[in-house]
């Protein structure tokens, strides 16, 4: 099957839609060859610029006039059907959509739960979850690795951290997936369902607090709502439950797929499991699970990479593209998967004040999951042609929706 061609809108902008996303690495490679920044269309009527070069990506992610405050782009967003400053829309008020000092205040409330030191304590439990999932598989056959293994590990971990009852976890997984796909027919329904369930859960934590992160957030609001408003409480809970696992689900999917396409790298990682932690950095670099960062909005007229961006201009930073444009040693081709790469530089978790809070947890989950999978599943191969896999078609995540495999396990 040939790769889909890069499509342009009537005014020459790159259209970042399903066809583009299905072939994102090749599409971004073409753009990088032409320059570090390009006019783009992210959806019907939603126009802006996409940054594809590494150095310019880091500049954009820390630019003092490129903010998360969307008010300068109000007319553009409204014309494209987006509702501004409505707590019932999107993920509501939370740190990913905030600038300092609100961002600083919101991030501080949850940062202690995701430090590398506290995250490392979860290692034995994550390994137990991974082994339990493999134990539950038939000894051989075919299955969807996303649903049987990749998704349940991070869903279980973040749900336990937040205090989400076990009976709701399958719902959270399905709703989170649709909530991040803005072009999905189920997008708005999934957001509403997530919001309703978390609103109910917050009410229950208020009357019967437990030793979990959501109870702590409820207490922070109830003790002093200047620290956390009711809308911010709900928005933060939604962000944590969704962002707290979707990145790892997609990281595991793209990592396993990359290995199945490169049997030599698969054998190497099986033979040398001590390479796994470093290999995770390579998987993050090679095919990042977050294709582009959430939008920035120009608070004033500015210039980026020699391109004038007017006030209200929308800028998206293609994290995956930037990872293929990082300075690498000459004998380490960035277009090639190399699980022994000594310096897999990337910005897959962002850069600057919005660097992913859950990065240590995602790294740990991926390392343990891959090491366990390769040790206990000695035979693993795709059950369908690689070019028949369905990729996430909209939004800022990158990953396969399912990963059918044939396997045998120990």
Image (cartoon, rainbow, N blue to C red):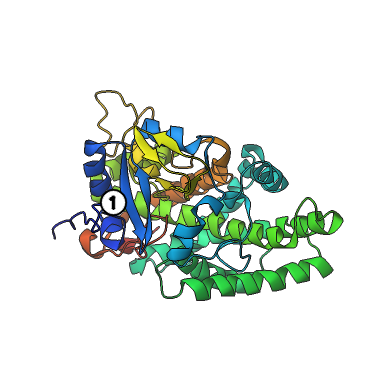
Secondary structure under tag 1 reads helix
41 and 187: which is toward the camera: 41
Image quadrant occupied by the C terminus: bottom left
Query: In which quadrant of the rendered view does residue 323 lie?
Result: top left
Q: Is residue 113 above or below residue 179?
A: above
Residue lying at 32% horizontally and 61% vertically, measured from the top left: 391
How far from the left and from the top, in percent, is residue 74?
A: 51, 57
Q: Position of residue 339 (x, y in %)?
A: 34, 37
**Displayed quadrant of residue 250:** bottom left
Query: Looking at the image, which residue sits at the far top?
Result: 330
The N terminus lies in quadrant: bottom left
* Residue 259 against residue 334 in the figure, above or below: below
Residue 288 visible in the shown view: yes
- Within the image, what quadrant is residue 143 found in? bottom left
Residue at 39% in and 28% down: 343
Disc 1: CA contacts within 10 A as few (<14), some (14-19) or many (>=20) = many
- The residue at the far left in this view is 2
**Closest to the observer: 140 or 277?**
277
Residue linked to disc 1: 24
State the residue in front, 164 or 78: 78
Can the viewer see residue 208? Answer: no
Tell me the residue at 84%/53% (across/down).
Answer: 224
Residue 108 x %, y %: 70, 43
**Is 168 placed above or below 342 here?**
below
Q: Is residue 387 left or right of residue 320?
A: left
The image shows residue 56 at horizontal and vertical percentages of: 39, 33
Q: In the picture provided, is 389 more to the left or to the right than 357?
A: left
Q: Residue furthest right?
A: 223
């Amino acid at each position: 099957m040939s790769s889909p061609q890069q499509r342009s809108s009537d005014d020459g902008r790159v259209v970042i839609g399903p066809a583009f996303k299905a072939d994102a690495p090749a599409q971004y490679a073409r753009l990088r060859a032409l320059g570090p920044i390009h006019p783009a269309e992210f959806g019907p009527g939603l126009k802006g610029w996409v940054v594809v070069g590494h150095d310019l990506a880091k500049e954009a992610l820390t630019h003092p006039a490129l903010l998360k405050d969307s008010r300068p782009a109000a007319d553009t967003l409204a014309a494209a059907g987006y509702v501004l400053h409505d707590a019932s829309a999107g993920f509501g008020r939370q740190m990913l959509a905030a600038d300092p000092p609100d961002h600083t205040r919101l991030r501080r409330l949850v940062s202690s739960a995701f430090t590398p030191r506290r995250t490392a304590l979860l290692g034995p439990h994550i390994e137990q979850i991974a082994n339990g999932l493999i134990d539950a598989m038939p000894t051989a056959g075919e299955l969807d690795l996303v649903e049987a293994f990749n998704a349940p590990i991070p869903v279980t971990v973040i749900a336990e951290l937040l205090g989400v009852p076990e009976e709701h976890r399958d719902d959270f997984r399905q709703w989170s997936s649709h909530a991040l796909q803005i072009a999905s027919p189920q997008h708005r329904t999934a957001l509403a369902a997530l919001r309703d369930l978390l609103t109910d859960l917050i009410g229950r934590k208020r009357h019967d607090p437990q030793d979990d992160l959501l109870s702590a957030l409820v207490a922070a609001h109830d003790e002093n709502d200047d620290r956390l408003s009711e809308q911010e409480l709900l928005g933060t809970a939604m962000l944590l439950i969704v962002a707290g696992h979707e990145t790892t689900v997609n990281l595991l999917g793209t990592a396993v797929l990359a290995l199945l396409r490169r049997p030599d790298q698969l054998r190497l990682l099986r033979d040398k499991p001590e390479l796994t932690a470093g290999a995770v950095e390579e998987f993050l670099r090679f095919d990042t699970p977050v294709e582009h960062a959430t939008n920035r909005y120009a608070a004033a007229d500015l210039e980026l990479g020699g391109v004038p961006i007017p006030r209200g201009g929308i800028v998206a930073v293609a994290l995956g593209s930037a990872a293929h444009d990082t300075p690498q040693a000459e004998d380490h081709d960035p277009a090639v998967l190399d699980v022994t790469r000594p310096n897999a530089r990337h910005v897959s978790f962002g850069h600057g004040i919005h660097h992913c809070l859950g990065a240590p947890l995602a790294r740990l989950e991926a390392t343990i999951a891959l090491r366990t999978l390769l040790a206990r599943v000695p035979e693993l191969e795709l059950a369908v042609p690689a070019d028949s896999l369905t990729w996430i078609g909209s939004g800022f995540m990158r990953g396969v929706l399912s990963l059918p495999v044939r396997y045998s396990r120990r």
